[in-house]
Amino acid sequence: MPNVDFVVAGAGHNSLITACYLVKAGFSCCVIDARSIPGGGCATEEILGPGYGIDTCSTGHTLMLQNPIIRADELGLVEKYGLSYLHPDPVAHVALPDGEQITMSLDCEATMAELARYSEKDAQSYGRLIAEFDELRPLLGKARSGPIGMAPSMKSLLAEHPRGGIWARRMAMSARDIILREFESPHVRAFMGWLSFQTAVPIDQAGTGILPYQIAAPRQASSWSIPKGGSGRLTDALVGFLGDHGVTFYCNATVARLILDDGRCVGVETNDGRAFRAKQGVVSTIHVKHLADMAPHEAWGEDFIFGTDTYNVGVPFFASYLATSAPPVFETPRGPRTAVSAGYAGWLENLVQSGRDIYDKRLSEEVAWLLVATPTLVDPSRAPEGHHTVKFLTHTIYDLPGVGPAGWADRKEAFADKLIETIRRFCPDFTDDVILQRMTKSPVDIEALNPHMIHGAPHGGDRSATFAGDQRPVPGWASHRMPIPGLYQTGGTTHPGGSITGFPGRNAAMVVLRDLGLDISNIMAV
Ligand SMILES: Cc1cc2nc3c(=O)[nH]c(=O)nc-3n(C[C@H](O)[C@H](O)[C@H](O)COP(=O)(O)OP(=O)(O)OC[C@H]3O[C@@H](n4cnc5c(N)ncnc54)[C@H](O)[C@@H]3O)c2cc1C
C-alpha cells in the first residue's frame, strides 16, 4: 500500500483543503474515505434519477466566500478549476404561523421595509444590527481564519476594541436573548430566530448571541451563496487540484485503527485490513468520538478521553429531497414569492422549545423550523429543463422514544409528509402532482452515509460556548495537534466548527506546515 508523506483520513471538504496546501508545499498525500465518493457533506448526487443534481447535504456556502481559498482564490479553484458562485435574490423567504410571510432581499433597505410592516423600530434595529456587524467582521476574520494558538484569540482582540465589552457580552449571551432585546414584533423575532437556528445550535444556548448578527449580515451582504452546478462543484475543484498534484483517492475504505509506532501515529488501517503508512503524519477528519476508539486510551491521556466522552454531537438533521415539475411558490397578499432559501418558522418561543426538546430527547410533534431549498430557481443546470430540485430540512431527534433509532425506518415518510404539509399552507400549488420523485433521510440515514455526522448531526458537534474556540474539540487540544504525535485533526469537530467554511481545513494546514518548519506565508496569503 502507499507510503506517502501524509495520509488524509476522511475526504470532507476540510481535509481535502488541508491536503491541497500540503501538496502545494511539495508533500505527497493519499486520501481515504468511507463513502464511494469524496466530499462528505459537500456533494451533489443524482439520487433521484439522471439530470437531478441533488445536494445531499450542504447547499449554501456563504461563509466559505470569506475564506482566502475563495476570496483570494489561493488554490486557483475559481480561475483554473471552474468553481463559481451564485448569489440569489431574494436571500430568503419565511412563512410564519399566522400566515404572515417575510422576504429578505439583497437590498438592505428593502428588507428593512419588509420588517417595518410589523415594527418600524424593528426595521431600524435590523439595519443597526447589520451595520454594527461591520466592526466585528475583521476581528472574527482574524480569530477564525487562523488556528487556535497561532491566531489572536477573540478575547484579546475584543480587549483592544473600543466596543469590545459590548461584543464580549453579546457573544456570551444566547441568540434568543439578543433577539428579545433587539426586536419587539413576534413576526420579526420569529424571522430572526429562523435565521439564527440555521447552524443547528439551540438558540437559547450560551454563546449563540453572535448568530443573529453572524448569519444575517453575511447573507444581507452577499446572499445564501451557492456553487453553480451544485455543492459538489467545490469538491470537484478540490479533487481536480489534488489529482493534478498526484494524489490518489481510496474510497469505500473505512478507517478502523490508527497505526502507532513507538507512540507516534504513522498511518491508518482500514476495516478490510489495508495499511496506509505515512512518513510525516496523518490528517484526520474522523469524528473525535470515533477517533478516540482507534488507539488505546492510554495513548490519548485522561483529559482527551474525558473531553471526547463529554463532547456533545449536536442537533440531528432530517432531510427530504424532491424532484419536481414546479418550485414551491408562496402566495402572499403582495403577490407570489419564491426563494432559493425559503422556509417556515414557529414563534420565537416555539423555536427555543424545539431546541430544548431535542436536547431533552423529546420528539416535537409541531414543526418549528423548516428550510426549503430550491437551488434550481437560479441554477437551472441542476435539473432537466423546467424542473426543480427541492430539499426540505429540519432538526429532530435521533433516538425515537419507545422504538429507538430503528423506528425512523417506519416513521420517516410520515414525518416528511408533515414538512410538506407545513409548506402547502402557503404554497397551495405545490401539490403531489408536481412531486415526481422523493427520497427521505432520517438522522439514522444521514449517520449511515457519513460516520462524521454522528446521530445525523451535521456540524461536527454543538457549537455553543462549551464546545467552541479553545474548547473544541477538547480543552488543551484545540490547535489541530492531537495528543498522539504525528496525528492532526481537522473538520467540523475543530475550530471554528462545521458548515462549509473551509476554515478548519486551512487552519489545520497552517499548523502542520508550521510544525514542518515551513514559512506558510510562501504557501498561503496569511
Ligand atoms: C442534510 C444536510 C444539509 C446541510 N446543509 C448545509 C448547508 O446548506 N450549508 C452548510 O454550510 N452546511 C450544511 N450542512 C453541514 C455540512 O455538510 C457539514 O458541516 C460539512 O460537510 C462538514 O464538513 P467536514 O469537511 O468537516 O466533514 P464532512 O463533510 O462531514 O466529511 C467527513 C468525511 O470523513 C469521512 N469519514 C468519517 N469517518 C471516517 C472513517 N472512519 N473512515 C473513512 N472516512 C471517514 C466521511 O465519509 C466524510 O466523507 C448540511 C448537512 C446535512 C446533513
Image (cartoon, rainbow, N blue to C red):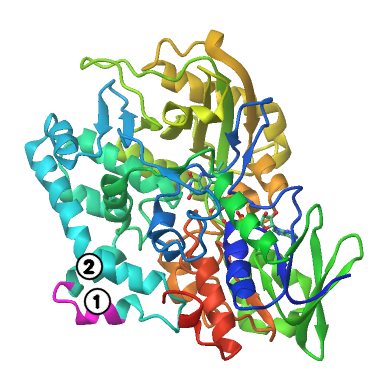
| Membership of 158 in magenta stretch | yes
Along the line of sight, which residue is nearer the eye, 351 or 13?
Answer: 13
Task: Determine whether, in the image, residue 302 is placed left or right of residue 68.
Answer: right
Along the line of sight, which residue is nearer the eye, 416 or 343?
Answer: 343
Query: In this view of the protein, can residue 381 be seen by the observer?
Result: yes
| Membership of 108 in magenta stretch | no
Q: Secondary structure at mark 1?
A: helix
Mark with earlier residue (1, 2): 1
Tell whether label 2 touches label 1 (CB within 8 Å).
yes
Name the residue at 46% across, 63% down.
69
Question: Residue 347: which quarter of the image?
Answer: top left
Tell me: residue 456, above or below residue 49: below
Tell me: residue 440, above or below residue 432: below
Name the residue at 68% across, 42% down.
444
Q: Quadrant of the N terminus?
A: bottom right
Residue underneath mark 1: 158
Name the residue at 58% across, 49% down.
42
Tell me: residue 518, above or below residue 45: below
| Residue 210 image point, x, y percent | 30, 59
Q: Secondary structure at mark 2?
A: helix
Q: Amino acid at mark 2?
A: Trp
Question: Residue 167 bears which disc, if any?
Answer: 2
| Residue 433 image point, x, y percent | 55, 8
Q: Amino acid at mark 1?
A: Leu
Q: Main secondary structure of the magenta part?
A: helix
Question: Residue 3: which quarter of the image?
Answer: bottom right
The boundaries of the magenta stretch are: 156-163
